[in-house]
Image (cartoon, rainbow, N blue to C red):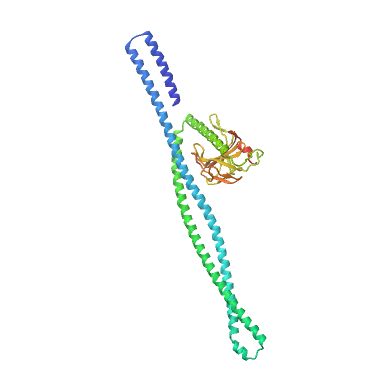
Amino acid sequence: MRDQIKRLTQLLRASAFSTGALLCLTFTPPALSASQQQLDGVKQEISRQQNQLSSKQKKINTLQQSLKQQELAIAATAKKIHQAEATVRTLARSIQALQQEQQALLQQQLGQQEMLKELLNTHYRQGKSSQLATLLSGMDQDRLDRMTVYAERLSQARAHTLDDLAATKTELQLKTHQLSQQRQQQQDLLAQLTDEKRRLEREQQQRQKTVRTIKGQLKSDTRYLSELKNNEKRLVAEIAKAKAAAEAARRVAMNGLAGQKGKLPWPVKGTIRHRYGSPLQGELRWKGMVISKPKGSQVNAIYGGKVVFADWLRGYGLMVAIDHGKGYMSFYGYNQTLLKKVGDTVQPSEAIALVGDSGGQETSALYFEIRRKGTALDPQSWLTR
């Protein structure tokens, strides 16, 4: 459409020249009127097409805003699912431990019951002859004293065993109650997970419709190229902001990535879909790399540092930027959800996000960049072979 406007503008200029020539050569009112009508028509066409361009750009911007809101909603739901799944795993381990404790208590209870039976049996056998009968039997005093002490100790042991058995029974009841509560909590969480996953599916379907509409609006190569250029400008602007914020808020010394080339772990392990420097569109080339990975996979920081950007960025979706110091920064885009926020300190290989397809991508992958003082570097050369 811009080419059409250009041609119409040239026609307008030619028409204006023709009108000037006509005014010099002739004063015929009908000819002047026809040229003026032609000029007015060209001006109206230019205005119409410019308005159409402006309207389409507004529509794209509105769609991108809708996409942002949908992908942020997906991110929130995906984060809830991630946290719920982690809680379910913790509960499963806790339930297993409680079951083992419960079994140990049951065995302990059985042992105490057997001991109590033995003590009662012994006490019963001893009780067949009373102290009076023993006294009248002519038993010497020393032996009588020993029998009395034995009887007292036997009675104490029985009382102690009864106390232990009561305590075991109480503890067993408590463990059974805890186990029941945690199983109920686990069931509730699993039901919540099912609901959240259904919601996630609905949100993703709505997002796909928006992505298809945006693709339709950007079907022109020139328009798509313009969008990609603008995306790059947005990223550069955010890098500048993040760098300024990092410098202003830096509290810990960070040594950058110097000396780490070829030694850093991969943020995700997967197939490389696009490499650094490969053609993107027209004269544009990839400033980072795109690694294919299933949705929901964990994204890890390549090195320690501080999170300086964690938000949705047009063209890159949900992105995390980590400042490693000395001008080095790493970027992780297209995520389904973010696990870190601005200001968080991260350790090497720590989980920072989950792989997704945000930013209007058609398939799930991770967009990964490394920059030094704003200049993009080949990220693959920094990763382990």
Q: For this view, does 183 lie left or right of residue 26?
A: right
For the point 37% across and 18% down, which residue is it? 39
- Whether residue 208 is situated above or below residue 129 in the rendered picture: above
For the point 63% across and 37% down, which residue is it? 381
- Nearer-the-camera pick, 315 or 132: 132
- Nearer-the-camera pick, 315 or 185: 185
Q: Position of residue 171 (x, y in %)?
A: 54, 67
Give the position of the N terminus as an image quadrant.
top left
Instruction: Note whether residue 240 is visible.
Output: yes
Quarter where residue 48 is shown: top left
- Nearer-the-camera pick, 230 or 293: 230
Q: Position of residue 60 (x, y in %)?
A: 44, 34
**Total number of numbered labels?**
0
Residue that protrudes farthest toward the top in the picture = 25
Give the position of the C terminus as an image quadrant.
top right
Q: Position of residue 364 (x, y in %)?
A: 52, 42
Instruction: Note whether residue 289 is visible.
Output: no
Quarter where residue 267 is shown: top right
Q: For this view, does 168 lie left or right of residue 262?
A: left
Residue that protrudes farthest toward the left in the picture = 30
Quarter where residue 293 is shown: top right
Q: Position of residue 59 (x, y in %)?
A: 42, 34
